[in-house]
Image: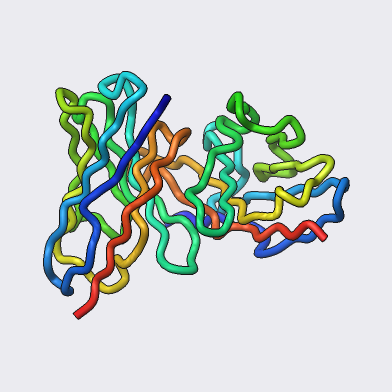
Amino acid sequence: QAVVTQEPSLTVSPGGTVTLTCGSSTGAVTSDHYPYWFQQKPGQAPRTLIYDTSKKYSRTPARFSGSLLGGKAALTLSGAQPEDEADYYCLLSYDDTRPWVFGGGTKLTVL
Amino acid sequence: QVQLVESGGGVVQPGRSLRLSCAASGFIFSSYVMHWVRQAPGKGLEWVSVISDDGGNKYYGDSVKGRFTVSRDNSKNILYLQMNGLRPEDTAIYYCVWGLGHWGQGTLVTVSS
């Protein structure tokens, strides 16, 4: 089974910029993996930030953006706020027999 | 607005069965793919299953394949997850997710003797 990799933890200063990445053991991540990004705060259900690599929901703050970067999916946070401290998960789509695989998550600290 | 309300969780002994339900409202349920995602205590998210809008196509993660069955009743706007042969490692919060965009609050399943 494919393994999706994320940085276990990252730290960003308030107002700073940070990029989280999402790689695949099968090779480069492309738009055909339809990358998703989710945010989860303690005690809450996850919420979806980004779908199809870079598309945002109406409720996604403008400071979050998605892209492909160096063979990985990427989530960039520009102008970090204290409320952005959370766990972030990516999700990739594979073949029809095993469609979706989550990454292990990145714990983002705003400090 | 969109609402997804999971139910059916609880404490169950290993080897037993449980059926989860997810009541959906606020969107045209019969037009959308639905997913189940779970999260073990203190762990990350794990994709469990997906079902197509008409229920004709179903896929599962490796850890539940052959034990769990996803289904839906489009006349009642309800998504189901039948879980058989439960194991302690199935202990988790189970989330119902509309098209990977909207999440329910989850229902806790604990498998323990």
Q: Is residue A34 above or below residue B82?
A: above
Residue sitting nearer the eye, B78 or A70: B78
- Residue B103 place in picture, x, y as percent: 43, 40
Q: Residue at x 46, y 40 (%)?
A: A93
Q: Is residue B30 above or below residue B6?
A: above
- Residue B83 place in picture, x, y as percent: 18, 56
Q: Is residue A61 above or below residue B26?
A: below
- Residue A20 place in picture, x, y as percent: 71, 50
Residue sitting nearer the eye, A87 or B104: B104
Q: Residue furthest bottom?
A: B113
Quadrant holding the N terminus of chain A: bottom left
Residue B77 visible at all: yes
Quadrant holding the C terminus of chain A: bottom right
Residue A31 visible at all: no
Q: Residue at x 38, y 33 (%)?
A: B98
Give the image's coloring scheme: rainbow
